[in-house]
Amino acid sequence: MGHCPCFGFRKKANRGEKLKFQQEEHSKVIEKKLHSPHNVSAEKPSGLLTPEATFATKEIDHSNNKAHIFTFRELATATKNFRDETFIGQGGFGTVYKGKLGKLNQVVAVKRLDTSGAQGEKEFLVEVLMLSLLRHPNLVNLIGYCAEGDQRLLVYDYMPMGSLESRLHDLPHDKEALDWNTRMKIATGAAKGINYLHNEAKPSVIYRDLKSSNILLDKGFVPKLSDFGLAKFGPTGDQSYVDTRVMGTHGYCAPEYATSGKLTRRSDIYSFGVLLLELITGRRAYDENRGHDKHLVDWRRATSTAGRGGHSDRSRFLVFQAIRSESTYRF
């Protein structure tokens, strides 16, 4: 994604006043949605899309979840104007940079969303709403956001250990592979995060995009679920599913959801099962370079079938054994 001009740096008083007004209007809308007892899709400025969900304020404690509002100038300064040296990674709808906030003296991750399409705009609002309502040790913490002009940025706590994906695949030779206990610690933490979304959050939330690249690792390899732009509030009343457009990541998406568009909590459970296989085997959920074994789930089914027929591949069996016994095993 290309770098856009740093809004607010130009010396035009009327433009600066206009941008300040736009920032205030977007902030008012987000605050109104977070504290209104009515529908989330209430009054909004032109250009902002809303998630299809409602929630009751009385069920949610906002006291410690207030997101800070940043100007674009502040975040451009924090990331050295989004230089390549501060680049962390590329997501589905934006680019993530490492930055340091002068006013808070804090190292942060700044996600700059691509708002050229409607999905990026929607992801911004959904993410702010979700992470302002949710709080759990295994969910990434949203510090604040910027909605100035056509800029949409999200600011999170910085995760020094990177993503789980970066620790499982294409690991540099100067880094040790995750040992078995650490992998189980990560799996347990991710499960706790999903359990919170499904059973403790009010209203319940379906994550919809559980994958290794969305699990960020804090100090001590504490896992944090991140990137809630595709999340949906769970079904209400006597409904058993949410009827929605199919979105997700190849290899992790539950087949029944992919074919029907009926989203349930079981969709997240399927993705978690794929994640467990990824942790155990060290293989990607989907790998174009693997010929007939592109899908990790299909490969595992094939090995199970072969095992029942007495023709299991011993080398594949050793992969499972090695991870249990060798903390430095590399795939």
Image (spheres, helix red, strand yellow):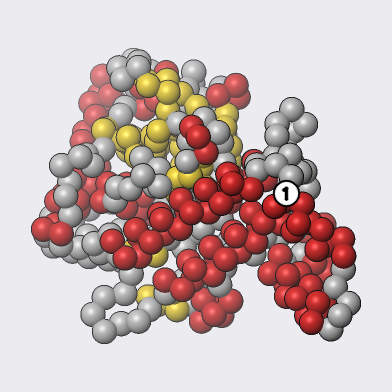
Residue 81 can be seen, yes or no? yes
Question: Could you tell me how many numbered marks the image carries?
Answer: 1
Q: Quarter of the image containing the N terminus?
A: top right
Residue that protrudes farthest toward the front in the picture: 325
Q: Secondary structure at mark 1?
A: helix
* Image side of residue 219 versus residue 150, left or right: right
**Residue at figure coordinates x 88%, y 77% from the top left:** 311
Circle 1 packing at 10 Å, graded few (<14), some (14-19), many (20+), is few
x, y (%) of residue 106? 37, 21
* 260 lies above or below 125: below
x, y (%) of residue 102? 35, 15
x, y (%) of residue 11? 34, 15
Q: Nearer the viewer, residue 108 or 161?
A: 161
**Residue at figure coordinates x 31%, y 65% from the top left:** 199
- Corner quadrant of residue 38: bottom left
* Image side of residue 310 versus residue 200, left or right: right
* Image side of residue 150 versus residue 331, left or right: left
- Corner quadrant of residue 297: bottom right
**Residue at figure coordinates x 36%, y 44% from the top left:** 137
* 226 lies above or below 83: below
* Image side of residue 77 versus residue 253, left or right: left
- Corner quadrant of residue 31: top left
Residue corresponding to mark 1: 325
* 120 lies above or below 307: above
Residue type, mark 1 in image: Ser
x, y (%) of residue 315? 87, 60
Q: Nearer the viewer, residue 24 or 295?
A: 295
Residue 29 can be seen, yes or no? no
**Residue at figure coordinates x 30%, y 29% from the top left:** 70
